[in-house]
Image (tube, helix red, strand yellow):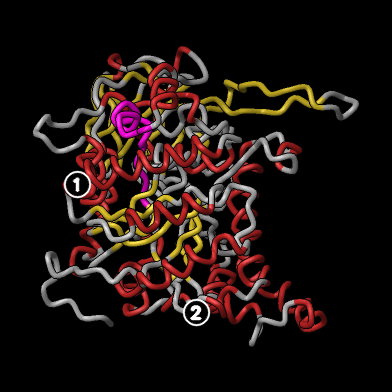
Amino acid sequence: MELPTSDRYHSMSVDSFDTEKLLTNAARQRDARKLNEFPIFDADAHHYEGESISEIIEFIDDDILNHLARANPAIISSGRGGYQPMGGRITRYPLRKIEETPADGTHRDVHLSRRWMDAMGIDYIGLFPTGMLGIGLIPQVEVEVQYARAYMRWLTEKILPQDPRVKGYVFLPFNSPEAAYEIATEFGDKEGIVGFLITSPRYKPVHDNAYMKTYSYIEETGKPLIFHSGLNWNDPLMSVTNRFIAAHALGFTLYNVIHMCNWICNALNERFPKIPVVWTESGLAWVPWLGQRLDNDYKMRSSEIPGLKKLPSEYMGDMFYTSQPMEMPNDLSFLESTFKMINAETQLLYSSDYPHWDADMPSTIYDLPFLDEKAKRNILGGNAIRIFNLDVSDRYPNYKAA
Amino acid sequence: MAKEILVGKASDFKEGDKKIVPNGKNSEIGVYLVHGNWYAYANLCPHQGGPACEGLLMAKVEEVIAEDKTYQGMRFNHDEMHIVCPWHGWEFDIADGQAVADRKWSLRKFEVEVRGEDVYVIA
């Protein structure tokens, strides 16, 4: 396979591709740091469910939509702009097509996940979709609902039962509060399901009364509610930007900023104190900014949000964050300060985002000079084991929380 | 103590070629022939440890700004070639191994010697 380059003299041709080979250096990191000696949970891993679109479409019950999707699967795409592979510079994007997996009855999706998990020393993953991250932006609510249900049936019937190391989240079609509740209750206790997912790029207020019964149900299950961010270059505000880097850096942060603001300002932490709320794929540097900003305003305008019993930043310190894409400033004291504000030792969950372009290896956490061994292990796995209530006895029979 | 690693025959390389050779048990060195010059760098990205030399060799991308400061587009500058790490896209100037986005970071550089037909890396 010829990879696209800037000129014909410096072309690169590749005959085969193997994730394990690409991640040889990750395996060396794993061995040098002895990452296989303690459990690592990757709270934000991805698969490309679009590669299995024909299988998922089989689970769409609605005859009309099923036909339309079979005729053209693009109708359930979200229209998110994207330049993730950077013109082919991230070679695993184009080469993924030629990676071979054995035809042994195990789904290709599972085979590919295991390869990179093993190379990095990751024991368990919480799997998110890729293309579906933007499905909350399409104008047809019924398409989101049908596709969410089809995806969940495919995920819980075809993928999760094949490997207990692969966990999943219930995709809530949030643009329909009723359907979100139905799907939450239908799939919330399926094998391998460890939480509930709201994709953040969308325009519904999380504090709408219509969602309260869904949150009540989630609270009863004891499982986390996860806001997974994303980008939408078509957003009128984002469309002012002309480079993907801007749409990405802003979009992946701002959608979670909006939902976090609404969650706090409507005192949902007080109404649902037992839901572990997790903010995913926004990095971390936004948290100190937003916390300080809200605290400052709240001290002047507390009458506007009387449901709060403490500072907004204190609620933020009670919530959970996944690490990737973790900002790595040259001056690590900035990052250390962020860790302090989010109470990282108990509230931060390692995430790789693999196989996406800005993935973080476990070493991004393990090599931080200001963390002790206990904090590293909590962030890489212990915190997730606690809030997702994971049983890791299959791989670590003697595991005890630090 | 420095050791010599035989890379291969100089005549086996054409413009833009690279060869990745083992350097001990757990590391490799990428050897390049670019614009008639030999370069060698550790196959280890200073960012997160990716196999930088297994990625593409790409020309620098430049902005075209007119005299009146208006933006006119972008173009490749083939005089400055970049090693691109395939894990995350960090780019390194082939001439010195420095990361083009932040020159405080760089690939480890090795000397290359061509003796007769043979190409050696001094590691």
Which residues fall within the magenta stretch?
A45-61
Q: Quadrant of the N terminus of chain A?
A: top left
Closer to the eye: label 2 or 1: 2
Q: Which residue is mark 1?
A: B24
Q: Chain of mark 1?
A: B
- Up/down of B77 relative to A376, above or below: above
Q: Which residue is mark 2?
A: A273
Q: Characterize the local packing of mark 1: few (<14), some (14-19) or many (20 or more) Cα atoms within 10 angstroms.
A: few
* Three-letter code for the amino acid on which mark 1 is drawn: Gly
Q: Is residue B81 left or right of residue A148?
A: right
* Alpha carbons under labels 2 and 1: distance apart: 55 Å
Q: Secondary structure at mark 2?
A: loop
Instruction: Looking at the picture, tell me which residue is in the foreground, A331 or B21.
Output: A331
Whether residues under marks 2 and 1 lie with C-beta atoms below 8 angstroms apart, the answer is no
Q: Residue A170 in magenta?
A: no
Q: Position of residue A305 (x, y in %)?
A: 73, 77
Q: Is residue A114 left or right of residue B71?
A: left
